Image (tube, rainbow, N blue to C red):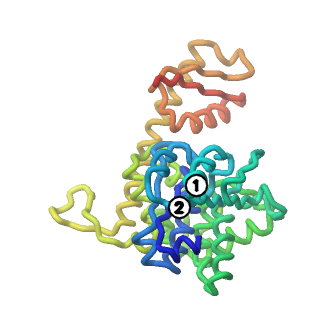
Amino acid sequence: MVRTIAAQQKAIVIVDSDCDGFTSSAVLINYLHDVFPQWVENKLDYALHSGKQHGLNDHIDHLLTENYSLVLVPDAGSNDVEECKKLKEKNIEVIILDHHICDLDNPYAYVINNQLSNYPNKELSGVGVTWQFCRYLDLLLFKNYADQYLDLVALGNDADMMSMTSIETKHLINKGLKQIQNPFIAYMHEKNKFSLGENLTPIGVAFYIAPFVNAIVRSGTLEEKTLVFNSMLKFLAFNEIPSTKRGHLLGEKEKLVEQAVRVATNVKARQTKAQDAGMAKIEQMIEDQDLLLHKVLLFLLEPNEVDKNIAGLIANKIMAKYQRPVCILTEVRD
């Protein structure tokens, strides 16, 4: 990576589609901007997924046609062997910073994954692995920036439900929540202070911050996702952009992070409405088809009966309510 930067070559970060993915990429980009601001602003791109995709698959055609020397994949990519092979054949290097279990050998990328090494803490999410990578860069470059992003590390680990029985994970979450510096987290805390109190706790973050990021990922447009992700980047978060407030004046501006928090709140409300409609649909099927006679609840749906991006969320709620394994399948027509 340092060779890529020194040669002023282009690179791209693939932002994974969940809260851990957003925070992982935000830690990496913020860190690199601290050390190499001009390179980040002129040579580093980042790409978000349109839906709940993960890894390289939906971006591979773009990556192969652009003039990138390096692809960085925080919180995903360990299993993307074929995609990494295609990139390697084009002399494009890939660095994967992941925590997901993988049973495939990937000789075409630099895979840094706590599940595939003797690293003792297996309860460290993608943002934790990314933070450790930045700590290593601190050592190489004689810098001390990585610990500035422990609030993002705390949010990502908390959102990914990493076990707090891990001493390291618990320490990182507790320490990160005591030093809130990230614009998005700080503004979300302020907006929800009545519920969160003066000091953030893991439970408070899990209920009043992480769900808004997950809602954006599941139910937001690509423009809304990009807005919220940008609000996690400290060199963009306080930019003045055209206001979208109800009743705003012509030409009125607002901080990007302020707009992002409002948009996240609106998308969460939109998701809740879609979730309630999906729950009603599923519960009507249970009643009409006497599905509680079965030990497993299996639903075969037509396209658009339930928003596919929140089908898993609905399945979890049905499972909790009826205490049965649940599977929601939606026919896909291409």
Q: Residue at the location (63% across, 37% down)?
A: 316
* Quarter of image, res 173: bottom right
- Per the model, the C-alpha gap separating discs 1 and 2 is 10 Å
Of mark 1 and mark 2, the one earlier in the sequence is 2
Please state the horizontal and vertical placement of residue 265, each as a whole percent of the image: 42, 53
Q: Furthest-top residue in view?
A: 289
Instruction: Name the residue tied to disc 2.
Output: 195
Question: What residue is at 49 percent from the left and 75 percent from the top?
Answer: 33
Say if 240 sits above or below 161 in the image.
below
Which amino acid type corresponds to the residue marked 2 in the rendered image? Ser
Do the CB atoms of the residues marked 1 and 2 lie less than 8 Å apart? yes
Q: Position of residue 222 (x, y in %)?
A: 40, 49
Q: Nearer the viewer, residue 150 or 319?
A: 150
The secondary structure type at the circle numbered 1 is: helix
Callout 2 crowding tier (Cα within 10 Å): few <14, some 14–19, many ≥20: few
Write the residue at 52% across / 77% down: 6
